[in-house]
């Protein structure tokens, strides 16, 4: 394990925060109890945002956070996650997940964006979305899914967060609360910018997405599933099984997640009556069961 | 002969005048073999680069850049000149880091982040490498077999 012990505890909570938020929980569950904005701990280093802001003021140039910043934050999130949960090394499994994800991405408002999908080893039913299209899903989630349409639903939810720049918005929100609205973006300021990447990772992993972003992501997921020809009812089925698992506390992991019922209800009303689509259970089993 | 040369010159000037030019309006833009994120990158452009429009196909634009052609989504382009991002204030250390990052296909700041937190970038590199295993042909076959996506 490459993390100092401090990271393990902090980041475990951080990652749980993300997990609880994406895609199974109404967002914001970890925000109130998450790390304070004044001093953020992740990766074993405490980042004083106030000091970082001061550093920014000394530099001769700054710019609003934008796509390149998202890429830095996205790459940072991938490193934070994959150092905790190793990347699955089965090229065929990763390729299958990528193809499902790209099928969804192709019908979004940003079809030529940067989308990098990966499978990470974990026995927790989790998914992780970093800014700029970096999306990771755990092996446990793949086992929990029962069809390609369910997997497509989970990925559609995650892709929506990327398309709508939810990670960047969460980071900006955190920075805004810390009184920092602008950051340096030149490569020459790499060291300083890295400190701000902490804030981005922290915002995504600890604060998570808010309730509105989660509802919007569900809504978009249904839209994308229908546009891609998948059965959107599969996503509803998936969320319902998560809720059932929560009720019976089978995994002991979803016990404090409010709002899932509301999400399922919202998803139900959005699916047109009689809407069907591809489920592709056999193809899913062929590609995923093999790896189980 | 003079008339022929004159006509040729006029045609050449006309072509250059008529060629539609657009500018990249996002920090990084991958110009791809086909219309979608699934297709391999032909060449990468950056903010402010000038591209030539070869054809417009619905919301996709086939562009030419540095002697190569490929597709981009129209939202990534501007019909007005866009200023490139300045990188003039790089010090020697930053330049070295940028070179290292470029070789790995990563952002320089990401490497700083990894270094600051004693994180390995192996997972990120491998994830990006596996992404490249998916070809446009794989994608088309996948969609066609499942009757999903653009093949539904």
Image: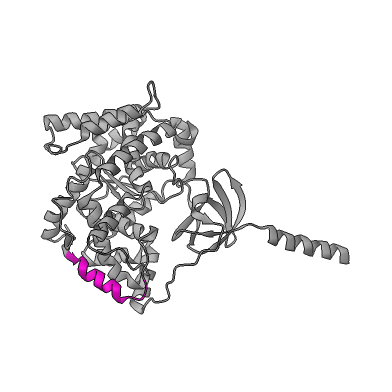
In depth, the one of A258 and B141 nearer the eye is: A258
Image quadrant in which you'd find residue A233: top left
What is the x, y in percent for residue A37? 18, 60
Left or right of B64, for residue A218: left
Residue at the (30%, 35%) spot, across then down:
A288
Question: Colour scheme of this structure image?
Answer: one colour
Q: Is residue A168 left or right of residue A103?
A: left
Instruction: Name the outermost residue toward the top.
Output: A274
Query: Is B80 covered by the magenta stretch?
Result: no
Residue at x 30%, y 58% (from the top left corner):
A73
Image x and y of residue A121, in percent: 23, 45
**Residue B46 drawn above or below residue A78:** below
Q: Nearer the viewer, residue A27 or B72?
A: A27
Task: Name the residue located 36 percent from the left edge and 33 percent from the top edge.
Answer: A222
Question: At x 27% / y 49%, what residue is drawn?
Answer: A87
Dividing the image into 4 quarters, which one contains the N terminus of chain A? bottom left
The stretch of residues the image draws in magenta is: A46-61
**Res. A146 in view:** no
Residue A52 is inside the magenta segment = yes
Quadrant (top left/top right/bottom left/bottom right) for the C terminus of chain A:
top left
Against A247, residue B12 (above or below) is below
Position in image of residue B107 (x %, y %): 36, 63
Res A33 visible? yes
Using the rendered view, name the quadrant where residue A71 is placed: bottom left
């Amino acid at each position: 394990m490459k993390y100092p012990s401090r990271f393990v505890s902090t980041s475990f909570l951080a990652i749980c925060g993300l997990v609880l938020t994406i895609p199974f929980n109404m967002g914001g569950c970890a925000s109130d109890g998450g790390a304070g904005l004044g001093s953020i701990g992740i990766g074993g280093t405490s980042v004083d945002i106030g000091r970082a802001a001061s550093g920014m003021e000394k530099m001769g140039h700054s710019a609003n956070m934008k796509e390149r910043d998202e890429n830095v934050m996205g790459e940072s999130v991938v490193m934070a996650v994959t150092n905790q949960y190793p990347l699955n090394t089965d090229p065929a499994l990763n390729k299958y997940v990528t193809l499902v994800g790209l099928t969804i991405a192709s019908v979004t408002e940003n079809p030529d964006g940067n989308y990098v999908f990966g499978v990470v080893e974990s026995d927790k039913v989790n998914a992780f979305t970093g800014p700029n299209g970096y999306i990771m899903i755990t092996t446990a989630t793949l086992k929990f899914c029962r069809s390609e349409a369910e997997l497509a639903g989970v990925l559609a939810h995650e892709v929506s967060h990327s398309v709508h720049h939810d990670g960047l918005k969460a980071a900006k929100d955190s920075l805004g609360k810390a009184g920092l609205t602008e950051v340096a973006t030149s490569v020459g300021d790499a060291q300083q910018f890295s400190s701000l990447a902490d804030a981005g990772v922290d915002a995504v992993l600890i604060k998570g997405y808010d309730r509105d972003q989660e509802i919007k992501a569900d809504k978009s997921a249904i839209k994308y599933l229908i546009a891609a020809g998948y059965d959107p009812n599969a996503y509803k089925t998936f969320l319902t099984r998560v809720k059932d698992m929560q009720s019976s506390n089978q995994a002991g992991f979803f016990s404090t997640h409010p709002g899932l019922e509301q999400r399922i209800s919202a998803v139900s009303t959005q699916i047109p009556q009689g809407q069907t689509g591809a489920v592709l259970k056999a193809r899913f089993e062929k590609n995923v069961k093999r790896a189980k | 002969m003079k008339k022929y040369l004159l006509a040729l010159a006029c045609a050449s000037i006309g072509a250059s005048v008529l060629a539609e030019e657009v500018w990249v309006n996002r920090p990084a833009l991958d110009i791809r073999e086909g219309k979608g994120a699934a297709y391999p990158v032909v060449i990468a452009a950056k903010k402010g680069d000038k591209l030539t429009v070869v054809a417009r196909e619905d919301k996709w634009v086939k562009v030419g850049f540095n002697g190569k052609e490929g597709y981009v989504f129209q939202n990534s382009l501007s019909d007005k000149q866009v200023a490139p991002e300045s990188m003039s204030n790089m010090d020697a250390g930053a330049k070295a880091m940028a070179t290292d990052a470029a070789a790995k296909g990563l952002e320089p700041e990401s490497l700083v982040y990894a270094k600051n937190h004693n994180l390995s970038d192996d997972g990120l590199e491998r994830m990006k490498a596996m992404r490249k295993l998916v070809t446009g042909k794989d994608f088309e076959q996948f969609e066609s077999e499942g009757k999903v996506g653009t093949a539904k």
